[in-house]
Image: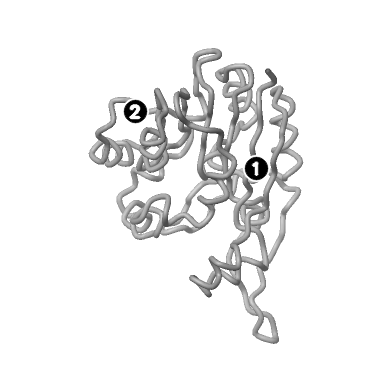
Amino acid sequence: MTQNIYDDDAFLQGYCQLPRSVHGLDGAPEWPSMRALLPPIDGLSVVDLGCGFGWFSRWAATAGASRILSLDISRNMLAHARAQTSSAAIEYEIADLETLDLPDRAFDLAYSSLAFHYVADFGRLARTVHRSLKPGGSLVFSIEHPINTAPSTPGWRKDGDGRAIWPLDGYFREGLRRNHWFVDGVEKYHRTLGTTFSALTGAGFDIDHLEEWRPSAAQIAAHPEWEQELDRPMFLLMRAKRSA
């Protein structure tokens, strides 16, 4: 079973201070790149995997999606999402992505933002999502880049010249990582880029976009502190499709 850290009050208090929690999609620096990967939403049936506070689900509703099934393991997150939602097109449900079951050929689009790195058996999840998509349907998702999930103690360091360095160890030692993020013991699963790619193709997906996200020049001009993100990729964005 996936760790339900988002129902830990101390963790949630810290998480709620993040720009993406306060400002939603506008506070997520990778959102413009994610949006560019999406098909036209009007009339589509969508499943939002790890919907959190429901920001994407509500955006999809305003973009004309006919149905959005929004899934998350956290009751706290879903309670907040429901309180902010007025669209009848959105259905929120408690679900563990580790044991998820979805109806076959039910969705045009599966979307997930920064959730899959909490799942131990990504291969099973990829197969489940593939079966749930209609022929020609798309999976668009983001995860923490493997360079972020690999280190035993992630975090910027200073070298002897005062330069910021991102230490990398254990890249090929895949599996569970427990680290401090607002609280101790937050569990994530590290997989190499090759393992993620192979899980998707093994499930039957055709991968047509892979992006190691970095901030644009305009974003850096607006947020100079983001220039540091040019020194290592923070997110991995992918689009995969079920063959028509």
Q: Which residue is denoted by mark 2 in the rendering? A: 90
User: Residue 24, how many percent across, how many down?
Assistant: 38, 51
Q: Camera-side residue: 26 or 83?
A: 26
Q: Nearer the viewer, residue 160 or 223?
A: 223
Residue type beneath disc 1: Gly
| Residue 173 screen position, x and y as percent | 72, 47
> Which of the two residues, 43 or 190, is positioned nearer the viewer here?
43
Of callouts 2 and 1, the N-terminal one: 2
Residue occupying the point 53% across, 75% down: 224
Q: Is residue 208 above or below residue 235?
A: above
Question: In the image, what residue type sits under mark 2?
Answer: Ile
The numbered dot on residue 175 is 1
Residue 82 is left or right of residue 38, and the answer is left
Residue 73: x %, y % from top left: 40, 34
Name the residue located 30 percent from the left edge and 39 percent from the top edge.
Answer: 81
- For the C terminus, the image quarter is top right
Per the model, the C-alpha gap separating discs 2 and 1 is 34 Å
